[in-house]
Amino acid sequence: MHQLLRLVALYPLVAFSAAYDTPNLEWVTEDYPPFNYHINGEVEGLSIRILNSIYRDLGWTLDKRDIMLVPWPRAYRMAMTSPNTCIFSITYTRERAELFQFIGPSIDNQVAIIGHKDNAYQVEDLADLKNYKIGVVKNDIGHQLLRKSNIGQDNLVFLASGFELVQMLKLKRIDLIAYGDIIARFQFKRAGIDPAHYRVILPLSRSYLGFACNKQVETQWVQSMNQALRRLRRNEPALFLPQSY
């Protein structure tokens, strides 16, 4: 009897400790600077710092070897089909909220149609985009928003990354790109292209970037990460500013 009571008394401590064991999660991402990218063989970026801070807040340890940087279509497919997989940085939409468990918001994000500053594009609404060739990354939010708006496949040029988008835009192999505004500006600089020569032609959506996990990931882990993220946004707001890059 005494032994049973002792076990009962210890149980809350054991449960508390177990709740703070690092979960067995695999993270997938893409080259999406300034939020996540490779530099000197390491995965770095603003979202990496936020994720590491979430883990630290929860008493977990983030092993960067559990973060895989791959092309976005592959990352998206892995997060959809692999039970213990989470993806970032991903723009929140209602449609994606039905497919994943979201952790966010982390960073505000505008997705837009971007083109040359001096070109006289005749674009007042989405219907006018049917007159142009638009560069997208497959299953990126820009692609998904255009598909939802019934922009035909014939108008889309699929490229592997945002870096390729800005390069092809500069070379005028495409007329426009559909991409995140902050990321596009960073990619222009990365490619040695002056972002001042480009402008937003048509905003597509304003939402937020965050993290998203496969539906089979433990709900408790996702809830804990959301709670940690809220604490960080309240206590460390500078952590979430892209301007620091």
Image (tube, rainbow, N blue to C red):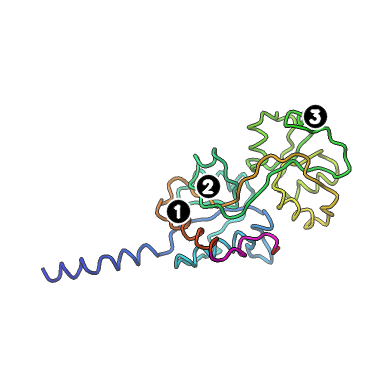
Q: What residue type is labelled 3?
A: Asn
Question: Where residue 188 appears, x then y in whole percent?
Answer: 79, 53
Question: In the rendered structure, does residue 240 fall within the stretch colored magenta?
Answer: yes
3 and 2 marks in contact (CB < 8 Å): no
- Depth-wise, is mark 2 or mark 1 nearer the camera? 1
Residue 164, compared with residue 39, is above or below; it is above
Which SS does the magenta portion mostly show?
Answer: helix
Residue 243, compared with residue 2, is above or below; it is above
Label 2, secondary structure: give it. helix
Q: Which amino acid does label 1 sit on?
A: Val
Q: What residue type is labelled 2?
A: Ala
User: Mark 3 to mark 1: distance in Å?
Assistant: 43 Å
Label 1, secondary structure: give it. helix
Question: In the rendered structure, does residue 27 fall within the stretch colored magenta?
Answer: no
3 and 1 marks in contact (CB < 8 Å): no
Q: Which of 162 and 119 is in front in this view?
A: 119
The numbered disc on residue 79 is 2
Which residue is drawn at the image coordinates 61% and 60% (left, top)? 240
